[in-house]
Amino acid sequence: MIKQRLVEGWEHYRGSLGGPWEVWRADKLQNHYNVPWHKVELPHTYNALDVMDPDGKYYQGQGWYRTKLAVNNPYPNGRTLLHFEGAGQRTVVYVYTSKVGSHLGGYDEFTVDITEAAAEATSIERYQGLVPVAVACDNSRELETIPSDASDFNLYGGIYRYLNLVYVPAVSLARVHVEADTSRLVAGDGKQSCTVKVRAKLYNPNAQRESLKLTIRLTDRAGDVLAESSVSCLPWEGEKELAVYELADPHLWSTDDPYLYGCTVRAESVHGETELAERFGVRYFEFVEHGPFKLNGERLLLRGTHRHEDHAGVGPAMTEEMIRCEMQLIKEMGANFIRLGHYQQSRIVLELCDELGILVWEEIPWCRGGLGGDSYRQQCRDMLTAMIEQHYNHPSVILWGLGNENDWECDFDYFDQEDIRRFMKELHDLSHQLDPSRLTSIRRCEFCKDIVDVYSPSIWAGWYRGIYTDYEASCRSAFDNVRSFFHMEWGADNLPTRHVEKTYTGFEFIPRGNGTTDERDGDYLLTGGEPRVSRDGDWSETYFCEMIDWYLKSQEHMDWLTGAAQWSFKDFATPVRPDSPIPYLNMKGIVERDFTKKEAYYVFQSYWATEPMAHIYGHSMPVRWGAPDERKTIKVYSNCVEAELFLNGQSLGVRKRDSQNFPAAGLRWETALESGMNHVKVVAVKDGVTVEDELTFEYQTAVWGAPTELRLTAEPQEDGRVYVEARAYDAHGVFCPDAANFVRFGLAGDGRLLDGLGTIRGSRLVQLATGLAGIYVDPQGGLPAGISVTDFVTAGGPAASLTGDSGKSGAGHPRVSVVSAACEGMATAFITI
């Protein structure tokens, strides 16, 4: 097998076409019907920025890709394949104008065989032996597919995972499954061994019958051979068991020691050879009925978060380097579990979970909406089958999720609970048929909780319902009502860099009843319904950190708890939240959409991380405020045994850490601050290792009124960008650190606002956070007034008359931009850069 990532050499057009002929027409005919193509690299989505456009809905429709491939298959009579690791949401593949394959579903892998069509296309003289390939992606709204457009995430379009060109012989290995039978280890009968079974499927489209020689090899982490065998046989259909080995004294895979074995299968025939290398782990787990979770026989508190495939500026089209960075951040935070919501994710994610020691709940995108007809149900079956078959070998996976919020009615004019129950049972049975070694799970569908193996109710104490001190009671009530309880999704929206001196104080107005703190229809809205923190709170990092602190300190002593997973690790784009402080952003993240850490990241580290750390709260809070001599709290989040705090060079004493001493596990100091600038430093010790942290901030004692004015400043950056910041002041020129008005940035001139990123410094419409807002500007990034000849052809010929000799209008003039900041009730502010 020869495999090549197809990253470069692609062009893209966002829009619908009449058919594949329109993709290639300009290669033969020059006329005004031709469309503009733009160079792109894969992975790519055509919704990278518009999902964060505050002034309109994101584009849903066709997007086309094209390239010309140099195909050189070295195998006699070999097969040439295009292997898609993910494209959304519906995909059709063409070689020149011939349709060679299609796929429904935006998240599972699929392969298209282009062998015959590629051979035929090489005869087209104008392509000089290259093979023209076109791919049409479509994320148009469609009720009879999953996921629902009512979901709290975007249904992206594009080839947003890697695409590979693959050469294989006429008969080749398609898939290898490795099963580690740990039943003897679980039984504890003294036989410290497990059985390893190796199975495989072939790709043999022309039903070749020549004999195959198969060589199977098991290796340890270092690559040393543990077992090897060979077998000769004729090609087969379906899945075939190739070998069974006894692995003595296996090294168990765990979250602290993610040990991976290797399994290599090589198939040789007169047509050539292929080799597939898989990794697997040996481990066993148990969700104790009405009890905790155990990994390899030992209780393990699952400390988790969630992940959406979504990133600033690229949407789901994250590179391998980006994905690795994200997963490393999650591990360094101390997490040992992740739920991949709400769809099958990139194989790279699962490989990293295996390597880093992060247990996984992965699910199909049957998310909200109800239950559709025959084609809808078949897509659910197909995607569950694909997810299990494609991610079977990953020891990190323990749960196959069958759905999310399936009690949410909206996509059909009927809602039949019994029908949903019957189909949920069908998926449960299918999952166990495909993979008896793992369990099934769902979140938030009370009328199906008895069907699956593990259930998570909706518990949002302190956000959508109730207050955060209700958390333990809510969990216990839910725990007592299911066989295996696992709490998925908790947290609070928090605008990055928004801090308050005193967090939300309206708890007395929030209804509290029988301990239920579930999210109900409409609770996510910012209007209507009962009093709740999500509607009435300040959406600050300060409140979020307090909530996290309470949840984590509670989880420490809940010895019956399986675990919980915060929602979600990163802020992400969503079409159903236009009224957020950054419109169309779900901002419950621990980090921003570009990996910028919020204060919450360090709260988690202080409970979960093993490496010594200490962090003073407020690194993104340049101004604190209060009366002269008013005593203020300085909090330190640390996993160290003790810490000493210094204010302006003077020690405020040593504090001992106690996880049950809320807040900040007792690492807090009450002190008066000096008017003006203050410097704070902490020195903490753990296991003989000393760690330090420090920050400087201004303490404002001047009293302010309502904001009446915005003032702009501009600060050039080393990379050539300019950071423009708006601050709110009252009528007397006093800074207003609690101002939370919406600010809209604009630009006229040669530059470009770097917006559409869904971050606190990358959004043109954003609420003030702690009295200020900012955005980065590319002073050289404005589009020229002229139209590029290569991008557009008019009915009367090339539009060269609209451009200068350089192809761009105004070439050579000094670059000037005027940035504006507008806020309701205030005069628009301007600054020239």
Image: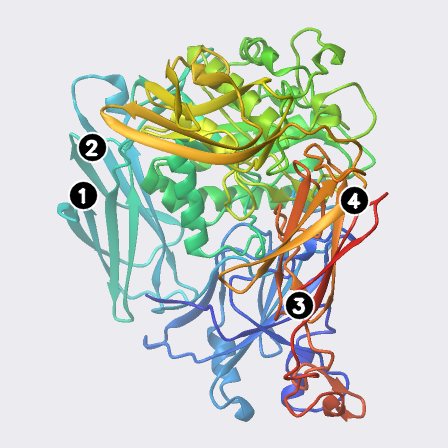
Tell me the crowding category of disc 4: few under 14, some 14 to 19, or many 20 or more residues within 10 angstroms, Cα based. Answer: many
Residue lying furthest right in this view?
A: 825
Mark identifier at residue 709: 4
Q: Nearer the viewer, mark 3 or mark 2?
A: 3
Asked if the residues shown at circle 2 and circle 1 are in contact, with their CB atoms under 8 angstroms apart, the answer is: yes
Query: Residue 206 is drawn in which quadrant?
Result: bottom left
Query: Residue 305: x and y, percent?
Result: 49, 32
**How far separated are the C-alphas under marks 3 and 2?**
58 Å
**How far separated are the C-alphas under marks 2 and 1?**
9 Å
Tell me the crowding category of disc 3: few under 14, some 14 to 19, or many 20 or more residues within 10 angstroms, Cα based. Answer: many
Quarter that holds the N terminus: bottom left
Query: Residue 341: x and y, percent?
Result: 55, 38
Relative to residue 727, is residue 295 depicted above or below?
above
Query: Residue 653: x and y, percent?
Result: 38, 16
Q: Nearer the viewer, mark 2 or mark 4?
A: 4
Q: Is residue 128 visible?
A: yes
Relative to residue 458, is residue 433 depicted above or below?
below
Q: Which residue is mark 3?
A: 751
Give the residue type at disc 4.
Glu
Tell me the crowding category of disc 1: few under 14, some 14 to 19, or many 20 or more residues within 10 angstroms, Cα based. Answer: some
